[in-house]
Image (cartoon, rainbow, N blue to C red):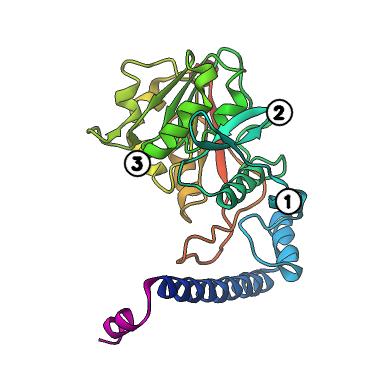
């Protein structure tokens, strides 16, 4: 009743501002409490590992963040330059000297925030770093970028590998991806479906996709908590494919690291987790032990099954 009355007497523009302020206040309260809870939890758990202690010490003197480490201070969002391509109306940034395009609906400020996050993701000290000196790509590799979004990972490596399959369902992202990878359209293919454990007009499983495209040798999997469905839909491929590497995210859900490690080891993969931790602030039900590994780096060679 009260809400209906307020809708009648308060203009929509003002209501939206009020709602935004209320949500921001709630979020600040949530983050403050979460920071206190994490510090309290690890204070009671002492002694703790050196990696846990690094986060514990950071939070005692800094605000909480997804990446609770000093390396994030290397990047200044306001220094990011955003350009407009007048030929297609899309905005872009230069990513490693190559144009990385964004959604048509994204504002300049939003693009700065988003790209700032991408820089943090792939910093050499980030727990979300896909590749390392010991876990890398070769010229003969074929990438399946599952959950491509803006495609920064594939753009970083497009000139190093043989072929790339981009899996992305969001139509706005697909428009941006086509612009980004136009110079390499001869070696980049876009699959406009969700990767899951089913096959339909909107979804596809890797087992089904690889019946025709069995050349994939590297998978990057970051699909907003749907990674387990990806694994269920890739059972045959992961079990039978040799000389395969995969970086699969584990930070969306508390038990994913443990669960995925078990599944992949049972498929004869060598499994290693990324260093350091993430605090997935977007999970409003996050609970102890709070800290999550960013991803698993796994690989299987022909020697593994000899």
Secondary structure under badge 2? loop
- Residue 277: image x %, image y %? 63, 52
Secondary structure under badge 3? helix
Mark 1 = which residue?
Answer: 76
- Residue 243: image x %, image y %? 51, 18
Range of residues picked out in magenta: 1-12
Q: Which of these two is toward me, 194 or 211?
A: 194
Q: Residues within 10 Å of mark 1 (few under 14, many from 20)?
A: few
- Residue 89: image x %, image y %? 49, 35
Alpha carbon separation for disc pair 1 and 3: 36 Å
Q: Residues within 10 Å of mark 2 (few under 14, many from 20)?
A: few
Mark 3 = which residue?
Answer: 229
Q: Which mark is residue 21?
A: none
Q: Which of these two is toward me, 151 or 71?
A: 151
The furthest residue to the left: 200
In the image, is residue 249 above or below residue 289? above
Residue 266 visible, this angle: no
């Amino acid at each position: 009743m009260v809400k209906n009355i307020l809708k009648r007497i308060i203009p929509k523009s003002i209501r939206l501002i009020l709602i935004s302020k209320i949500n921001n206040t709630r979020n600040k309260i949530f983050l403050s409490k979460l920071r206190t809870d994490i510090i309290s939890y690890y204070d009671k758990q002492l002694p703790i590992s050196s990696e846990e202690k690094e986060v514990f010490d950071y939070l005692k003197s800094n605000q909480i963040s997804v990446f609770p480490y000093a390396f994030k201070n290397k990047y200044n969002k306001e220094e990011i330059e955003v350009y407009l391509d007048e030929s297609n109306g899309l905005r872009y940034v230069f990513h490693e000297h190559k144009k990385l395009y964004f959604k048509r609906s994204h504002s300049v400020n939003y693009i700065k925030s988003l790209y700032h996050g991408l820089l943090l993701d792939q910093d050499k000290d980030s727990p979300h770093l896909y590749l390392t000196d010991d876990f890398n790509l070769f010229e003969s590799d074929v990438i399946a970028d599952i959950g491509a979004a803006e495609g920064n990972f594939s753009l970083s490596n497009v000139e190093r590998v043989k072929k790339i399959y981009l899996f992305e369902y969001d139509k706005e992202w697909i428009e941006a991806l086509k612009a980004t990878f136009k110079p390499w359209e001869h070696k980049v293919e876009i699959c406009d479906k969700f990767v899951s454990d089913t096959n339909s007009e909107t979804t596809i499983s890797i087992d089904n996709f690889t019946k025709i495209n069995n050349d994939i040798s590297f998978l990057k999997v970051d699909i907003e908590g749907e990674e387990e469905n990806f694994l269920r839909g890739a059972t045959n491929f992961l079990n039978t494919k040799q000389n395969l590497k995969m970086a699969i995210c584990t930070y969306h859900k508390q038990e994913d690291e443990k669960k995925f490690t078990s599944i992949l080891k049972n498929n004869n993969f060598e499994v290693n987790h990324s260093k350091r931790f993430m605090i997935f602030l977007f999970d409003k039900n996050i609970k102890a032990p709070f800290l999550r590994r960013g991803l698993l780096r796994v690989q299987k060679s022909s020697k593994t099954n000899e």
